[in-house]
Image (cartoon, rainbow, N blue to C red):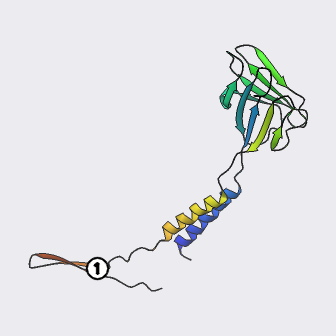
Amino acid sequence: MSSKTLRSLVTLVLLLTAAAHARAAVLYTFSSQAHPGPSSDFSFVVDDLLTTTTIVEASDLFDVITYIPGATLGLVGFTDPQTNPNIFLFYPDTGRLIIYSRWPEPFTRLGSYTPGTGVALVISSVPEPSTLAMLSCALAALGFTRRRRRPRPEDLFLASQAGRLTCRFHFRRRDR
């Protein structure tokens, strides 16, 4: 086995191994549009399901919509998400703290949760790059490195005959 082939195989194995160990992140989306009281909608991404009390700063939130005039969402907290979950929203400019409790079950899996008050929390997996796409890239890279090259001239003789420049190529045939 040539060194190029071995190098290509090692690259392919490394790419496939990286694809197999890729972990999907988790997207939390909180919606309170149907809630009669003041609140906010927001989303954030973490590496894995929340298992302990967690505070999420405003800078880590995205798609934030606040239904309180003149208020800015400062931080979001999840207390004890695996046993008795509560979600609290803090608005530092107004000093308001809103707590959502009475969730029907703990946040232990991907899915949709609602306490029946017009509030919903959806926990979903962020799509990761497909293993098939990574395999396709690896195979394309192998194809480019292994593509057949045109035979190179073994000898190139330039001769001048009556003011004309002529080139003669001598190719060596490859044994297969």
Locate residue 27: give its quadrant: top right
Q: Amino acid at mark 1?
A: Asp
> How far from the left and from the top, in percent, is residue 93?
70, 14
Residue at image coords 68%, 26%: 65
In the image, is 35 to the left or to the right of 72?
A: right
142 or 36: which is nearer to us?
36
113 or 89: which is nearer to us?
113
Residue farthest to the top? 94
> How far from the left and from the top, in percent, is residue 152?
35, 76
154 or 137: which is nearer to us?
137
> How far from the left and from the top, in percent, is residue 2?
53, 75
Residue farthest to the left? 162
Relative to residue 106, is residue 39 depicted above or below? above
> How far from the left and from the top, in percent, is residue 110?
80, 44
Relative to residue 65, is residue 146 depicted above or below? below
Locate residue 15: give its quadrant: bottom right
Q: Which residue is mark 1?
A: 155
Relative to residue 66, is residue 158 depicted above or below? below
Residue at image coords 70%, 27%: 57
